[in-house]
Amino acid sequence: MNETINPWLIIAGILGGALTIAPGLIWLERRLLALWQDRYGPNRAGPFGVLVVLADTIKLFFKEDWIPPFADKLVFVIAPAIVAITVLMSFVIIPIAPGFIVADFNIGILFFLAMSSMGAYSIILGGWASNNKYALLGSMRGAAQLISYEVFMGLSLMGVVLLTGSFRVEDIVNAQKDMWFVVPQFVGFVTFLIAGIAETHRLPFDIPEAESELIAGFHSEYSGMKFGLFFVGEYLGIMLISSLVTCLFFGGWLGPDFLPPVVWFLIKMFAFIFLFILLRASLPRPRYDQLMEFGWKILLPITLLNLMITAGIILYRSGAELNIIF
Amino acid sequence: MKDLDPPELLQVKFGEDAIARQTTPDGIATVWVRAAKIKEVFQYLKSEIAKPFLFLYDITAIDERPRKRENGYPSDQFTVVYHLYSFGRNNFLRIKVALKEDNFSVASISNLWMNANWYEREVFDMFGIRFEGHPNLRRILMPMTWQGHPLRKEHPARATELGPFRLYEEMEDTEQSALQFKPEEWGLQTQSEDSDFMFLNIGPQHPGTHGVLRIILQLDGEDIVDAVPDIGFHHRGAEKMAERQSWHTYIPYTDRVDYLGGVNNNLAYLLAVEKLAGIQVPPRAQVIRVMLCEFFRIASHLVWYGTFAQDVGQLSPVFYMFTDREKIFDVVEAICGGRMHPNWFRIGGVAQDLPNGWENLVKYFIDYFPSKLREYDKMVMQNAIFKARTKGIGIFTQQEAIEWGATGANLRATGLAWDVRKQMPYSGYDNFHFEVPIGHHGDCFDRAAVRVEEMRQSLHIIEQCFRNMPAGPYKADHPQATPPVKKHTMKDIETLITHFLNVSWGPVISPGEVMSITEATKGANSYYAISDGNTSPYRMRIRTPSFAHMQMISYISRGYTVADLLSILGAMDYVLADIDR
């Protein structure tokens, strides 16, 4: 759209936007859950209770920044930073509008996958450094879950990459001018969404936290702003997955001209954020081994099949002669 | 040859001099057995007679020392009382053992019945009676550091009798170190051949335990090798309190035993007192009682339903179900004035007649609730993840359920249609039509399904109450009914005096002992009331279903994972106040 936008402005815009929306989501989630659960939710501070976010932030800042004496101090401090940093870094590859992107990598999707794998460290290290049995159980579960769901998270995106022939997210969006990829890649979309929920460990995939079993799981020992980073990191993760789904399967900023591209992007992103919250309101939590089974025995074969069929169709369409010699 | 009743069978087998009979107003066959013979007697009753007594219902004790005893009463120190139940005979048998002054001990029967273990520990804790051969005879409800045995008559009942309490630092240290879990004390290994076990302390403050319950898990990875429940954090001495209260003023304390069961507790207590006093409750009062009991059954099941869904991770149902529970409380509030603890039943009836317009409230709920239950079926019971979390989890068979003393929905989920309301109808339950839902697999899902169906049946009973509410008095015209009827009080001096005494001191209940059996919200609930002809109970034993169910936890959670434990705990439907009393 406009090549002259100062990159610093883009960075400030995306960083500022992400860090404003993420805490806002806390309010949004609480209000929406309340709506669906026949309650009021936070409705006192400010109009519709939006200032509850501010109150929460102030509270978190003023809490004692306590590090348990039995914890591994250095790792304990680093862990929450990792989650925030990796998720924020992932945002660099997301085009909000044409040209409105921090770093236009030609390996955009690979970069995102790398960052999300790094994010797993925060759970593992946080749980381990806490030196608490509940945290340990949570982080063990988290590690297993993230590793298994990452496998087909990457694979589920490969269909889209094949159709586009590029890892650049902007190319992928532009390739959806005629048809959103959710149509040809419906299976890819579903599996990526499921993997995405698992990646952000939200209900029904919140087994690293599993509050009724493990109290707070891997972040049981965290308080103050360190807990706040985990908390915000989770909401940043929701935003990230929602914007990726938007870009990869729902045509990103593309939409009829009566609204600017950024607005189309935000509308689609928020639709998926709503879906995340709705899922939390309605589904129970499967057991850890059931989740693993579901991932390895059902989702992984489906993803692989999807990838093979997509590749086959592309090969067939391109008219390449199938000279397979047995 | 005519069928001999159990006491006669015992006399034939063990000789007339070993077995003595006692008659009690509740009609439960009561025999005294010599302490030396006790194991043989139980062995005989459990496995050698036709229609055996398979179910150890309760074990408790009585401190007989200051009691005004009838002539020839065989015990003057401590009496251990066992209640057995035979499914074939549909009858109870009470066995009493008198302990001699020099030796407060009796043989343990914990190898005969699994559930004897905790009951014997409780008797030891409360009375200091030793059970020879018990695998782990230690305190269960009181702190390990407690001095004395609370239900002994010389033990003070009030904090003010003890002098001011101060928690010195040394005391804090000893108290805390007493709570340290030492696996060796429980015979638990710290490692197996190929792995070290982790001991995970769940509770007393934990979001999944629904109250101050502590469970120590022996874990191999996430698999439960063994679990040790530690109860007593909610112990308030409800049984001891009874000994200080008048028969009338004890009613509100019963409300708080199973705090979700509300008037069901009142009823269990009052049935015992009314039988002791020989009071006939008029039909209208009976139907009012039944109606309120069923309302509370639904309310309690709704709390269980919602929290169970939450235990397996479903966040929303609990809010809908609490909203519906409010609708029940609207009715309860209009009738009783109170909500969770309505304290509404009185000796001989209920506190007041139904208010004007009660029909509309009840009708509204009868019309409103069925569609909600269908909605919850779709939301919870038919949810695939919910099924995956509950089907095939925490299975116990019918035999195991009986062995461990499970009652209520937990027993019925194993396929046995045993409901006290049907087996031994009380308060006119035999006049109502209702089904006893049963399960077949004895897993968490079946337990849930049985409770859900029970709500429908309870609603059905409420509907019958609503359609057939008899006219007439709401309280028995009996001198011992409370508060005493005031009709003639201002007209002649004799009734004025009686009224004055019954209000100020409370009624004097004639001596004797009675055990009531009711189907409370969570299973069979009993009050074993012993009167020595005074204005307050001499001894009040509360047998609660949750106590027996909690004891099963260690047995049924072995081999499952931590996540399954939450399903098992949730499906069990216990209330900590009901366990600890």
Image (tube, helix red, strand yellow):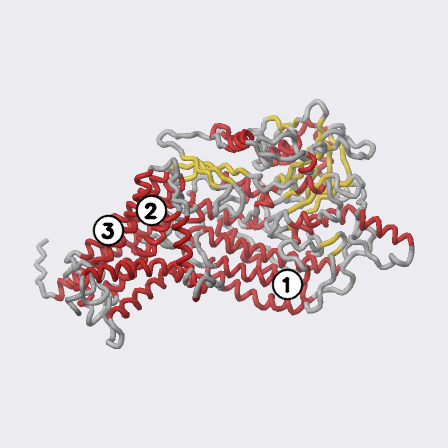
Q: Residue B459 carries which label?
A: none
Q: Distance between the residues labelled 2 and 3?
A: 16 Å
Residue A117 rendering spot, x and y as whole percentages: 25, 49
Residue farthest bottom in this picture: A258
Disc nearer the start of the sequence (2/3): 3
Closer-to-camera residue (A87/B544): A87
* Label 2: chain letter: A
Of marks 3 and 1, the one in the foreground: 3
What's under tag 3, amino acid-wise?
Answer: Met
Circles 2 and 3: CB atoms closer than 8 Å: no
* Label 1: chain letter: B
What's under tag 1, amino acid-wise?
Answer: Val
Q: Which residue is drawn at 34% across and 52% down?
A: A201
Secondary element at tag 2? helix
Circles 1 and 2: CB atoms closer than 8 Å: no
Q: Name the residue under label 2.
A: A142
Q: Residue at x 67, y 39 (%)?
A: B83
Count the labels in the image: 3
Of marks 2 and 3, the one in the foreground: 3
Q: How crowded is mark 3: few (under 14 residues within 10 Å), some or many (20 or more)?
A: many
Q: How far apart are marks 1 and 2 (CA)?
A: 47 Å
Q: Residues within 10 Å of mark 1 (few under 14, many from 20)?
A: many
Secondary element at tag 1? helix
Secondary element at tag 3? helix
What's under tag 2, amino acid-wise?
Answer: Gly
Closer-to-camera residue (A141/A1): A1
Q: Mark 1 points at which residue?
A: B331
Does residue A312 appear in this view? yes
* Label 3: chain letter: A
Placement of A167 over or under B2, stated as above or below: below
Q: Mark 3 points at which residue?
A: A115
